[in-house]
Amino acid sequence: MDTKVYDDFEPFCKWQTESTYDILKVYLQGFQKEQIKIEMNSKDEIIICGERPSDVSPDRIKRFHKEIRVSPKEYDTKEIDANFDAGCLSIVMPKKVRSNIIFADQLVCLKHLYRRPEIGKSSPAVKALLAISLGMVVGVVLAYKYSHYSSVASNND
């Protein structure tokens, strides 16, 4: 009777983040490429599993099963690639390029907000506001001069 004993383990994983892609490194010392299976399921998960004979006993099998959720909004799932070299499985996940339409709209709004208004093409409300402001300034200056003139004249009497 041939009974196998399975030793399940969780492989050490490390994320490497770049601007245009992320890499998941899964360390699988002692495994051969043929002993590892990688697939993408319909739930947008990368499934990595593998098994190999144990170093301890021929009746023991060392195995693992790992699922990684991949966001199709963030990654180009059709371009995900894997490479196994020297006991390290590298899964490269290219990020989707996001066109920032909102930013472009904001830029156009800012351009119009900070443009210099041309004299003579101001709205009537702006012209009225300028006229009122100018009148107030002239009034304050005249009031100051009149009060200063009247105080000097009263001191001379």
Image: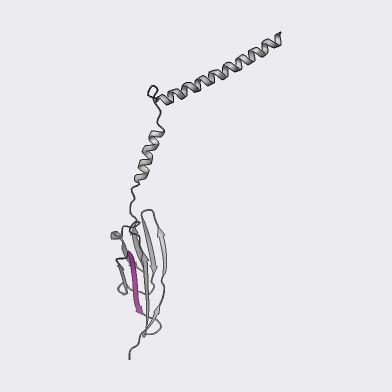
Which quadrant of the figure contains the C terminus? top right
Segment tinted magenta in the rendering: 43-54
**Where residue 14 sits: x, y (%)?**
42, 64
Percent x, y of residue 143: 59, 17
Image vertical order of residue 138 relative to residue 16, above or below? above
Q: Check the image and name the residue furthest to the top.
A: 157
Q: Which picture quadrant has residue 88? A: bottom left
The answer to which quarter of the image holds residue 68 is: bottom left
Q: Give percent across and percent down for residue 11.
A: 41, 71
Q: Nearer the viewer, residue 72 or 128?
A: 128
> Where residue 42 sits: x, y (%)?
29, 66
Name the dominant secondary structure of the magenta segment. Answer: strand
Q: Quadrant of residue 59?
A: bottom left
Q: Nearer the viewer, residue 113 or 17?
A: 113
Pick the residue in front: 138 or 76.
138
Residue at the (70%, 9%) spot, across then down: 156
Q: Is residue 87 visible?
A: no
Q: Where, quadrant-wise, is the N terminus in this rendering?
A: bottom left
Q: Residue at x 47, y 21 (%)?
A: 131
Q: Is residue 46 left or right of residue 10?
A: left
Q: Please tell me whether residue 73 belongs to the stretch shown in magenta.
A: no
Whether residue 51 is situated above or below residue 41 in the rendered picture: below
Q: Residue furthest left?
A: 78
Residue visible at 35% across and 42% down in the picture:
104
Q: Is residue 34 visible?
A: yes
Q: How many marks?
A: 0
